Image (cartoon, rainbow, N blue to C red):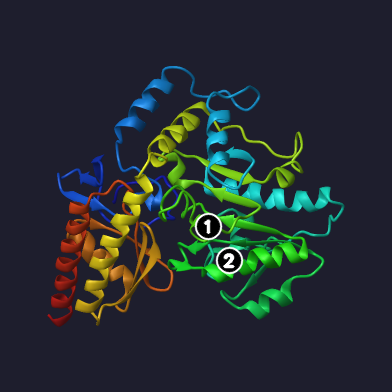
């Protein structure tokens, strides 16, 4: 009889057990070393065991872990102020995850119109290929059949449109439309970037019809794309935004950010969270910003992105039968594959390189933002070894 299992059977991890981690590297129980270009799916923004984060967590753990929002929580005002000072937002609500941040964003959009005397404006327009979370509400927002199957009636209030179909978008807006929700760059959807002119068009369309523009920057935010937030690349501001992942550097933390006008619709008692914004999370969030907001940090991310993309473009030229092109911004990088992406990911794992799949047969490469140029070159070398081994195995 095999080993008993008492967890839900919803994951399929490879047969590797990691024992420790440091910087951009993971080490398994057999002592094997892996370069980590998953970052916990864009979560470990500063790598593993970053000294400032470790010391911050230790210090806070000796003070207060949890209070609940019945009381003022240390660090909330500071983190909220820093996020607002560096973005479009005026108000922040802290959560534990991206899906909770998205739930708050959806509620805020609908509540805003309710407060404006338009309670029927509840529909939110979303786009094919999007991923907004795994709750019953956010899988309806994403609209992907593989996530909706088997969970009963689909939550109403979401209009899912083809990606990039401008005519369908204009036709979908009516007097029940509350907002347009979009990822500036789709992560799970295959590192598909919304062009600058389209983001600007969405802003203009929302302004024209009195509806809200919502950004899901759970994966793209906190320096991942070379700016603190991806939409800042194109100078297009939303009314509401959800963030998570990188802001906690590996600690569960998310936030819903909004303008003053929109946020004021969420009055006392309309939303809450027991764990959201707890003292440990706030300490870590502030520590992450200590590093990410340092002078030249974003410049370094962009410089490393250029080097990464140069190497990947060379690989596309070298392996035209396996690879098709490079996508993304900053250190949110997608390698569009011709061979099955999951097979190439397995081949890279065999060479000690960890990457993650995405839609549209894309390999997602998400290194910690602190990755060195030498490690980027090591990633290239491991990819070459993996692709050569894959091709040899195909011929055997």
Residue at 25 percent of width and 46 percent of height: 24
Q: Where is residue 87 in the image (x, y as percent from the top left)?
A: 56, 46
Question: Relative to residue 315, is residue 396 drawn left or right?
Answer: left
- Read off the residue under disc 2: 199
Identify the element where label 1 is drawn. helix
Question: Relative to residue 282, is residue 175 drawn left or right?
Answer: right
The answer to whether residue 328 is above or below residue 138 is: below
Q: Position of residue 254 (x, y in %)?
A: 53, 43
The answer to whether residue 341 is above or below residue 66 is: below
Residue at 49 percent of width and 52 percent of height: 229
Circles 2 and 1, Cβ within 8 Å, touching? The answer is yes
Tally of marks: 2
The answer, for residue 13, to whether it is visible in the render is no
- Separation of marks 2 and 1 at Cα, in angstroms: 8 Å
Identify the element where label 2 is drawn. helix
Residue at 18 percent of width and 58 percent of height: 377
- Read off the residue under disc 1: 231
Task: Please rate how many residues cluster around mark 2, counting C-alpha atoms within 10 Å: few if below 14, some from 14 to 19, many from 20.
Answer: many
Question: Which residue is more in the foreground, 71 or 80?
Answer: 80
**In the displayed image of the protein, which residue is found farthest to the top?**
63
Question: Relative to residue 195, is residue 204 drawn left or right?
Answer: right
Residue at 54 percent of width and 61 percent of height: 183
Question: Which residue is more in the foreground, 71 or 372?
Answer: 372
Among the two numbered marks 2 and 1 on one chain, the one whose residue lies closer to the N terminus: 2
| Quarter of the image that includes the C terminus | bottom left
Q: Where is residue 110 in the image (x, y as percent from the top left)?
A: 75, 53
The answer to whether residue 2 is above or below residue 191 is: above
**In the displayed image of the protein, which residue is found farthest to the right?**
117
């Amino acid at each position: 009889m095999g080993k008993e299992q008492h967890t839900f059977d919803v994951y399929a991890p490879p047969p590797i057990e990691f024992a420790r981690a440091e910087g951009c590297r993971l080490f398994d129980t057999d002592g094997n070393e892996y370069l980590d270009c998953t970052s916990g799916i864009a979560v470990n923004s500063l790598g593993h065991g970053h000294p400032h984060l470790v010391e911050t967590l230790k210090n806070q753990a000796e003070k207060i872990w949890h209070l609940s929002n019945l009381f003022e929580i240390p660090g909330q005002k500071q983190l909220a102020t820093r996020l607002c000072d560096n973005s479009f937002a005026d108000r922040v609500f802290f959560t534990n995850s991206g899906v909770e941040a998205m739930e708050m964003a959806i509620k805020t959009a609908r509540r805003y119109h309710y407060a404006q005397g338009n309670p029927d404006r509840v529909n939110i327009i979303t786009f094919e290929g999007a991923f907004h979370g795994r709750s019953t509400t956010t899988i309806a927002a994403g609209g992907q059949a593989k996530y909706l199957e088997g969970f009963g009636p689909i939550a109403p209030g979401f209009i899912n449109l083809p990606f990039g179909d401008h005519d369908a978008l204009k036709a979908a807006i009516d007097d029940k439309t509350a907002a347009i929700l979009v990822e500036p760059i789709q992560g799970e959807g295959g590192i598909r970037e919304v062009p600058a002119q389209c983001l600007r068009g969405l802003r203009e369309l929302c302004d024209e019809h009195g509806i809200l523009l919502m950004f899901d920057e759970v994966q793209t935010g906190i320096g991942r794309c070379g700016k603190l937030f991806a939409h800042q690349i194109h100078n297009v501001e939303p009314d509401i935004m959800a963030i998570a992942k990188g802001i906690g550097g590996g600690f569960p933390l998310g936030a819903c950010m909004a303008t003053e006008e929109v946020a004021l619709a969420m009055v006392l008692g309309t939303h809450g969270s027991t764990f959201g914004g707890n003292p440990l999370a706030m300490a870590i969030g502030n520590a992450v910003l200590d590093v990410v907001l340092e002078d030249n940090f974003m410049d370094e991310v962009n410089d490393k992105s250029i080097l990464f993309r140069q190497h990947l473009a060379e690989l596309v030229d070298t392996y035209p039968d396996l690879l098709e092109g490079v996508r993304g911004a900053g250190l949110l990088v997608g390698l569009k594959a011709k061979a099955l992406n999951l097979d190439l990911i397995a081949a890279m794992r065999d060479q000690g390189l960890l990457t993650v799949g995405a839609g549209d047969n894309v390999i997602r490469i998400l290194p910690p933002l602190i990755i060195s140029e030498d490690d980027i070159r090591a990633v290239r070398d491991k990819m070459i070894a993996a692709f050569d081994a894959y091709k040899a195995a195909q011929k055997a």
